[in-house]
Each structure stands twice: as structure tokens, then as C-alpha cells.
Image (cartoon, rainbow, N blue to C red):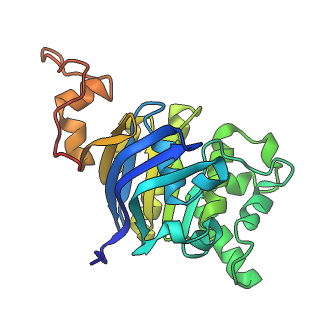
Amino acid sequence: MPNDDVILAVDTVHATYNHAITALHGVSFELRRGQILALLGANGAGKTTTLKAVSNLLPAERGQVNAGTIRYDGSDVSRRKPGDLVRAGLVQVLEGRHCFKSLTVEENLIAGGIGRSGSRAEINGDLERIYGYFPRLREKRRTLSGLTSGGEQQMTAIGRALMSRPRLLVLDEPSMGLAPIIVQDIFQSLKKLNRETGLSILVAEQNSAVALRYADHATVLENGVSVLAGAAPELRQREDIRAFYLGQSNPGQQASPATKPAHLHAVA
């Protein structure tokens, strides 16, 4: 029986590209409603493939899920088209931002609401709500997106996704290429959004330090397998995790060797 408290359930997922290249061979995690879950791991660990599988985007890249299940709100995502998932509230911000550079920031945001019902007054209300979470976008609303900074483009991409009123927001490497202060601004806005609206968020991040600071729970991927899972505050405090994934260790305390840390709990 599906757990009504779980908005996204990924169970022992295996995936390949071109029927030959194995990208995932055992990824499992659950995201509870109203929480933030960080998907961590080095480059090539399988984070992006996992997110594309969640949104059923793999077939567009000659990929496929070979085994396991992914359920969004109790429904098997493999039976639904990506557009249907968006209309059902599962919205993803892909790595690289992908703003329409010849449109203004506000036009980019409005584009995110295309395809949904709503009056002009409702759209304006959503714009104001997004400007409340990302004040820099209000200042740049009339500026062409291509003339804004990388951080402002990332905020625009997130704001555009929010215009579709998602229930689950999926983010792929939102901190990539951005200055630390901008990364902090973005994650603080996401946390505020999560707390005030109950929006569920799944974020894949190579920047484990910032992700663990703002997430409720985290799952670590290595070579296409989920190897660690636990509450984010607990993961942050473990010395082996700090040394291996965060590059930190306490003075006078020997860190664990740079090998796979002991599990918080095994992930099947």
C-alpha cells in the first residue's frame, strides 16, 4: 500500500543508456511531503540520471529504467508523459538554467505559467509571490535574461518553475558555477519557500556542505548506487562524512580513511 505521507518513492531503480551503458544499479529513497531531500554524490555518481528518471525524461536521451519503480504521489511515473507529470505538480529545473535569453526576466517567469489555467490577476499574484522570495528578480524584471548574472538566471529558472505551482520541485545542481554568497541566497529562499508553503523539494547537489545545511534528509550516491541515507543534521555531524564528502575534519581528531564511510543505515 502506498504511504500517503510520501510524495516520491524511488525503489531499487536500475537505468541504462543505449541499452548498454549502466548508469544506475540500485537507487532507493523516499521523500516525504513538505520536506527537502538532498541527493548527494560526486560527478558521475548518477544524480542527474536519477532526476531525469523521476521526471520520465530518460527516453528522450535514449535512456530507460530497466528495473525498480518510481512513484510520484502514488502513481508510476513510467506510465506518464513528462508534460503530464508537470501538470500533476512534478516540476524540474534542469542543470544549466536554460533561460530564454532574448526574453526579459518577467517574460521568462510568465512563460512558466503557460499551459495552466488562471486569470491575469492570478498570474500577477504569482509573480509578486516569486519576487517576494527572490527580490533580485523584481529589480531585474525588465532586463533581458541573457544580460543577467548566473545567479540571477538560476533564480529566474527556479521562479519560472514555481509559476506552474508545483507540489514537488526537483533541482539539479542549483549551486553550480555560482559564488558562495549567491548559493546561500538561493538556498535560504528555497528553505523559506519550503517552510511557508509546504513545497516538497528534491535537490541534487555536488556541494554537500550547503545541501546538508538546508535539507531535512539526504541520500548519497556512489557509482549509481545509493549507499548512505539519514537525517541531514546527523550526516553533517559524522566525522567520516565530514572528511569524505565535506572535506572537513575536527582538529586533533583523526578522520576516517577516504573510502566509503560506514552506513548510517544500509540502503537496499
Residue located 39% across and 53% down the image = 13
Query: In this view of the protein, which residue sits in the foreground, 130 or 242?
Result: 242
Residue 198 versus residue 229 in the image, above or below: below
Residue 157 versus residue 209 in the image, above or below: below
Q: Quadrant of residue 108?
A: bottom right
Residue located 54% across and 60% down the image = 55
Query: In this view of the protein, which residue sits in the foreground, 194 or 13?
Result: 13
Q: Quadrant of residue 261?
A: top left
From the viewer's perspective, tell me whether residue 233 is left or right of residue 65: left
Q: Which quarter of the image is occupied by the N terminus?
A: bottom left
Residue located 19% across and 21% down the image = 250
Most extreme residue toward the front, as rendered?
19
Residue located 61% across and 69% down the image = 81
Most extreme residue toward the left, as rendered?
253
Asked whether the viewer can see residue 185, the reply is no
Query: In this view of the protein, which residue sits in the foreground, 263 or 184?
Result: 263
From the viewer's perspective, tell me whether residue 249 is left or right of residue 66: left
Q: Position of residue 52 (x, y in %)?
A: 54, 52
Q: Position of residue 87 (x, y in %)?
A: 61, 75
Q: Position of residue 244 (x, y in %)?
A: 28, 25
From the viewer's perspective, tell me whether residue 78 is left or right of residue 198: right
